[in-house]
Image: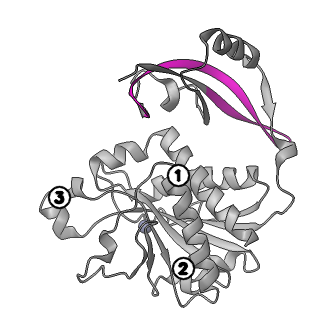
């Protein structure tokens, strides 16, 4: 086994007019146990005060003098990406599944789903705007919005995405099996008037989630009462759930994403980390944005 070194540089995203700029915050050296296996450094500031939004990895094999020069060159520099924004802008509705009055699932720690949805949907909205899209947020201000009216908040929008965090069947909680359930799930409804486009977007989001290192949960397809959702794409975690009110009442293509399972205490802790929230948001926004052009 060859010992290699990975230099990880943290960037913080800043807003400057319509452009997204990235400020270099800190470089950290990781040691790597083997090919492709990055050992997590518990002291890494990613989840904390430095608010890293992006990481640039410079992997071994590069002469260390080059790396020092490179780190010196980007030090303190603001990289602005505004000019790279795509010309095509879509209008996307980002729904914060649930409300304070109906907060959804309760995480293992007691923190409710609505708060997880709020954090993630805020980042998804930011990411979509950074890609050049127009965003309308629903249920982010705590107001009660009936499920059947959510997509109608912006009826002419191009796409509707409802953001949730998952629970599991009560019998599994009662049996102490919370640790067995983890991962994301994406739902589409055949009753949506744009089913094919909804499915295309669900797949695009699933691909981005996989690329971000997330894994699909497949337990919603289990043939039991309360689940039994037809699995349309096992690899990408895409299911059909025709009765979902937010999807079937949406006049535009629509998907519902369960980002992860907050009833699982390990998964809940992970889903609360700022850099995981950011990575999930980036994946969901990229998928939603990419499928608008197809
Ligand atoms: Zn929910």
Label 2 secondary element: helix
Distance (Cα) linking label 2 and label 1: 27 Å
Q: Which mark is residue 246?
A: 2
- Using the rendered view, name the quadrant where residue 133 is placed: bottom right
Does residue 165 sit above or below 252 in this rendering? above
Q: Mark 2 or mark 1: which comes first in sequence? A: 1
Give the residues drawn in magenta, as a range. Answer: 10-36
Q: In the image, which is nearer the foreground, mark 2 or mark 1?
A: 1
Give residue 177's mark.
Answer: 3
Q: Nearer the viewer, residue 228 or 72?
A: 72
Q: Is mark 1 within 8 Å of ligand 1?
A: no
* Residue 144 in sight: no
- In percent of width and height, residue 20 lies at 78, 40
Distance from disc 3 to disc 1, alpha carbons, whole Å, reads 28 Å
The answer to whether the residues at label 2 and label 1 have Cβ atoms under 8 Å apart is no
Q: Secondary structure at mark 1?
A: helix
Q: Is residue 179 left or right of residue 210?
A: left
Which residue corresponds to mark 1? 211
How many badges with numbers are in the image? 3
Q: Secondary structure at mark 3?
A: loop
Label 1 crowd bin: few (<14), some (14–19), many (20+), radius 10 Å: few
The one of 238 and 280 positioned closer to us in this rendering: 238
Residue 182 visible, this angle:
yes
Q: Quadrant of residue 11?
A: top right
């Amino acid at each position: 086994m060859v010992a290699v070194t990975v230099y990880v540089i943290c960037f913080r995203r800043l807003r400057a007019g319509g452009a997204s700029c990235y400020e270099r915050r800190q470089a950290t050296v990781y040691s790597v146990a083997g090919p492709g296996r990055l050992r997590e450094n518990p002291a890494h500031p990613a989840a904390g005060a430095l608010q890293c939004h992006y990481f640039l990895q410079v992997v071994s094999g590069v002469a260390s003098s080059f790396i020092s020069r490179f780190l010196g060159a980007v030090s303190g520099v603001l990289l602005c990406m505004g000019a790279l924004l795509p010309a095509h802008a879509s209008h996307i509705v980002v729904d914060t599944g649930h409300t304070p009055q109906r907060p959804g699932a309760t995480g293992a720690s007691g923190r409710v789903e609505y708060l997880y949805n709020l954090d993630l949907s805020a980042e998804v909205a930011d990411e979509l705007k950074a890609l050049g899209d127009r965003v309308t947020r629903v249920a982010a201000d705590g107001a009660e919005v009936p499920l059947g009216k959510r997509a109608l908040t912006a009826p002419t929008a191009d796409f509707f995405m409802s953001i949730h965090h998952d629970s599991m069947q009560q019998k599994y909680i009662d049996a102490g099996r919370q640790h067995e359930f983890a991962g994301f799930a994406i739902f589409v409804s055949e009753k949506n008037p744009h089913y094919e486009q909804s499915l295309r977007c669900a797949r695009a989001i699933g691909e981005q989630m996989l690329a971000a290192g997330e894994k699909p949960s497949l337990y919603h397809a289990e043939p039991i009462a309360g689940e039994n959702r037809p699995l349309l794409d096992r690899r990408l975690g895409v299911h059909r759930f025709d009765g979902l009110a937010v999807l079937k009442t949406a006049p535009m293509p629509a998907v519902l994403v369960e980002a992860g399972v907050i009833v699982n205490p390990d998964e809940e802790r992970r889903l609360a980390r700022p850099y995981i929230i950011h990575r999930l948001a980036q994946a969901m926004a990229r998928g939603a944005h990419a499928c608008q052009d197809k």
